[in-house]
Amino acid sequence: MTLLDAPKFDEARELRNRVMLYSGGGLLFIFIIVFWFAAGHPADWPWNWWTHLRGRYTINHFMGAVEKNDLKQAYGIWMHDPNWQQHPNKYGAYPFDRFEADWGTNSSQNEYGIIQSHQIVAARVFRNVLLVGLLINGRKSKALFLTYYPKDHTLDFAPPDEELYLGP
């Protein structure tokens, strides 16, 4: 076969290939945008968006249980162990009694009172955790900062020196 014996140009095939290429690129772009919105439009790298999605879901699920005053379910979400009552000695560092004192409705440790609503106002991957800022009961003053550990899916209070800037 020589250069002069080249096959005829197939215009329909070329058009079909171009449409498939542009359609695939457009679908990929739409998938990225939808995933960014689903993750809560994080100002973070795309490889952290899954952590944002899982962390926000876990914290919303946890706060929903606290708002319903179902502290046993909330503790299971906090420790990422729905069967925690079968082995409560495993969680000696933060036992259920202490958890109940922190999150209970009539607790002296709970400065928010009865928790009726929450709003996630900021989230950022910091070091190896997702740091999330919450406004409890519509408060505008002091936000509650929780951390979500993506490796074991547990929650914890953020250290006092690690807070996100929430604006003026």
Image: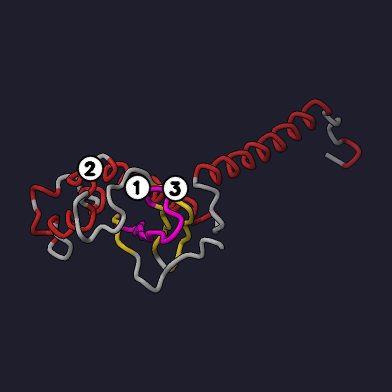
Q: Which mark is residue 58?
A: 1
Quarter of the image for residue 100 reads bottom left
Q: Residue at x 12, y 63 (%)?
A: 92
Where is residue 70 drawn, in percent x and y? 21, 42
Q: Residue at x 24, y 51 (%)?
A: 80
Tell me where residue 27 sits by quadrant: top right
In this image, 49 relative to 107: left or right? right
The residue under label 2 is 69
The residue at 19%/51% (across/down) is 106
Mark 3 lies on residue: 53
Q: Amino acid at mark 1?
A: Thr
Magenta stretch bounds: 136-153
Residue 151 point in image, percent of width and height: 33, 58
Q: Tell whether 85 sits left or right of 52.
A: left
Magenta-drawn stretch contains 145? yes
Query: How many numbered callouts?
Result: 3
Q: What is the distance, in whole Å, between disc 2 and disc 1 at their CAs?
A: 17 Å
Q: Amino acid at mark 3?
A: Leu
Residue flagged by tag 2: what amino acid is it? Answer: Asn
User: Please, which colouring scheme is shown?
Assistant: secondary structure
The reply, left or right, for residue 157 in relation to residue 119 is: left
Q: Is residue 163 above or below residue 59?
A: below
Q: Nearer the viewer, residue 67 or 37?
A: 67
Q: Quick check: 139 above or below 164?
A: above
Between 55 and 62, the one lying in front of the other is 62
Do labels 2 and 3 touch, CB within 8 Å? no
What element does badge 2 sit on?
A: loop
- Mark 2 or mark 3: which comes first in sequence? 3
